[in-house]
Image (spheres, rainbow, N blue to C red):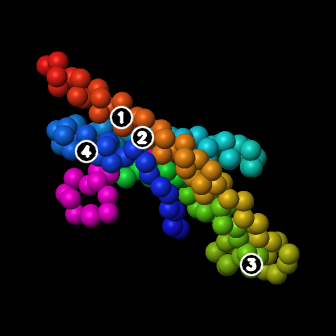
Amino acid sequence: MKIESNLTGFKELEQALKNVAGEVSAKALRGALRSGGNIVKRAIESNIAANFDSDTGQLAESVRVKSTLNKKQNHNIYDAAVYVGVYNVRAIQAAAGKDIPASVIAYWLESGVKPHDLNAKSKRSRGKVGEGENNFHPGIAPKPFIRPALLNNEDAVLNATRVDLKARIDRVVRKATRG
């Protein structure tokens, strides 16, 4: 998936970030990216609540925001990155009493499932060995909820990241001039 967007106001912030000490600038960048990621997280959670009935809440509770820094400088694409999505959380999966991880369920719901015969292992686990209509899955129509959350909030994410990064840089500069 390729998403293109025009960024304005980030050149000045990038220059200000270079003037701040390395460890502090990385923290500021990571925090600002997480604030933008939280907007997408909330949108995903609201899409889940609006589109799907849930008996356990496993899917909504498994939405996470993760961020990473390029500490080793082995990637020339990014210095920091944020990932928002549905992750496997074993404690939530166990509490829900589900065998299938939330990330797999999310993939099926997002992209849909074609009608198909169930394999022998699946039939055995359900006690439906043999022929019959119970051994055929009718399929699921795709109901995207992750991709629209990102695409519909692209400007809000960039704005929040820009504002948060500016505030964090200003805070670091104020601290440095005081002390």
> Do labels 2 and 4 touch, CB within 8 Å?
no
Q: Amino acid at mark 3?
A: His
Residue extent of the magenta highlight: 60-80
> Do labels 2 and 1 touch, CB within 8 Å?
yes
Cα separation, mark 4 vs mark 1, equals: 11 Å
Q: Amino acid at mark 2?
A: Arg
Q: Which residue is located at x 40 percent, y 34 percent?
A: 164
Cα separation, mark 3 vs mark 2, equals: 47 Å
Taking the image as shown, residue 160 lies to the left or right of residue 43, namely left
Q: Position of residue 86 (x, y in %)?
A: 54, 52
How many residues crowd around disc 2 within 10 Å: few (fewer than 14), some, or many (20 or more)?
many
Cα separation, mark 3 vs mark 4, equals: 55 Å
Q: Position of residue 53 (x, y in %)?
A: 76, 47
In this rendering, which labeled residue sits more in front, label 3 or label 2? 2
The quarter holding residue 25 reads top left
The quarter holding residue 104 reads bottom right
Q: Which mark is residue 166?
A: 1
Q: Which residue is mark 3?
A: 116
Q: Which residue is mark 4?
A: 15
Q: Which residue is located at x 55 percent, y 42 percent?
A: 156
Taking the image as shown, residue 97 lies to the left or right of residue 28, namely right
In this rendering, which labeled residue sits more in front, label 3 or label 1? 1
In this rendering, which labeled residue sits more in front, label 3 or label 4? 4
Q: Position of residue 153 (x, y in %)?
A: 59, 47
The tag earlier along the polypeptide, 2 or 4, is: 4
Q: Amino acid at mark 4?
A: Gln
Q: Which residue is mark 2?
A: 162
How many residues crowd around disc 4 within 10 Å: few (fewer than 14), some, or many (20 or more)?
few
Q: Is residue 106 above or below residue 34?
A: below
How many residues crowd around disc 1 within 10 Å: few (fewer than 14), some, or many (20 or more)?
many
